[in-house]
């Protein structure tokens, strides 16, 4: 039997710089060690190989930076969320920052991974890697198709998947003095329909008969959302769902 937790918190962190090349499993291991170094009273599972009771939200692709990643952590003692943030952030290496924590209703709230429904991204092309495209003309035509098929490879082999229903929102953002936009996307991110921003860009280039150049884009995740359940595609940031009275 595992330890009894008295507090469940949802912790938000960012990921930038060289640590963007650290994969999801290694990120999980890193935070497990950081939690121990921070001397947080974390709850452990039972059995012969106990581990910290924590749940990360949507995995972040290698090479993608983020302004909003989440994991849930259970503690055996009550503690102000500001103190949790302070202790954990003191243990972060360059590139990781713990920016917020909020108490959630442990008995009523699902874990972070099961709540994920969508995510926001910004995508830009690296210098010299952008093909000649009339974005204002070509991108809307691409999105106006009846379907956008891509090939996904799984345990059962390759299959064609229509990702158009997984593209919830897009916006071309032209910064001052820039001829080419940064592309904002809100994409489906549940385990059943997880859609990567590079899949959308590659499909767009294929639509224009342009061969995608490997590593030509940079992506940053802005926020991760849960389904609010009130109406179709109505989302709420993961850090705002199921919160208790204490937040940082």
Image (cartoon, rainbow, N blue to C red):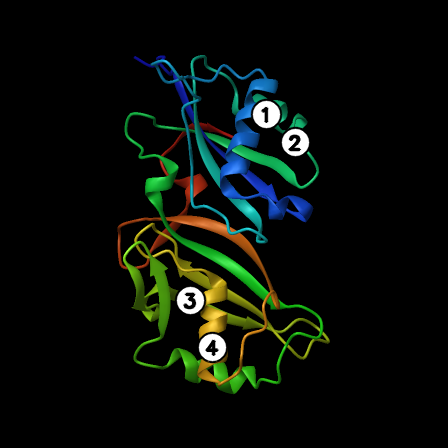
42 or 170, nearer to the observer: 42
Choose the circle earlier in sequence order: 1 or 3. Answer: 1
Badge 3 marks a residue whose secondary structure is strand
97 or 46, nearer to the observer: 46
In the picture, the quarter occupied by the N terminus is top left
In the picture, the quarter occupied by the C terminus is top right
Q: Which mark is residue 215?
A: none
Choose the circle earlier in sequence order: 1 or 4. Answer: 1
Q: Which mark is residue 169?
A: 3
Residue 75 horizontal/vertical position (percent): 44, 18
Badge 1 marks a residue whose secondary structure is helix
Cα distance in 3D space between marks 1 and 3: 36 Å
Whether label 3 touches label 4, CB < 8 Å: no
Of badges 1 and 3, the one in the foreground is 1
Q: Which mark is residue 92?
A: 2
Cα distance in 3D space between marks 2 and 1: 7 Å
Residue 224 horizontal/vertical position (percent): 45, 49
- Can residue 38 be seen here? The reply is no
Residue bearing the label numbered 4: 204
Residue bearing the label numbered 1: 34
Choose the circle earlier in sequence order: 2 or 1. Answer: 1
Of badges 3 and 4, the one in the foreground is 4
231 or 93, nearer to the observer: 93
């Amino acid at each position: 039997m595992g330890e009894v937790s008295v507090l469940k918190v949802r912790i938000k962190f960012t990921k930038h710089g060289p640590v963007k090349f650290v994969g999801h499993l290694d990120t999980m291991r890193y935070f497990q060690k950081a939690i121990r170094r921070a001397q947080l009273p974390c709850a452990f599972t039972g059995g012969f190989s106990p581990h910290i009771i924590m749940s990360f939200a949507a995995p972040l692709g290698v090479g993608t930076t983020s302004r909003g990643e989440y994991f849930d952590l259970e503690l055996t003692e009550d503690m102000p969320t500001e103190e949790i943030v302070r202790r954990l952030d003191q243990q972060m290496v360059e590139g990781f920052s713990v920016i917020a924590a909020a108490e959630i209703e442990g008995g009523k709230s699902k874990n972070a991974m099961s709540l994920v429904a969508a995510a926001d991204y910004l995508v830009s092309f690296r210098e010299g890697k952008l093909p000649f495209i009339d974005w204002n003309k070509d991108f809307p035509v691409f999105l106006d198709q009846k379907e956008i098929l891509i090939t996904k490879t799984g345990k059962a082999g390759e299959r064609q998947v229509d990702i158009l229903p997984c593209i919830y929102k897009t916006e071309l953002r032209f910064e001052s003095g820039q001829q080419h936009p940064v592309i904002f996307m809100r994409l489906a991110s549940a385990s059943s329909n997880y859609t990567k921003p590079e899949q959308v860009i590659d499909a767009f280039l294929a639509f224009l008969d342009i061969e995608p150049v490997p590593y030509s884009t940079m992506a940053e995740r802005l926020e991760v959302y849960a389904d609010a359940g009130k109406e179709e595609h109505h989302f709420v940031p993961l850090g705002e769902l199921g919160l208790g009275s204490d937040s940082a």
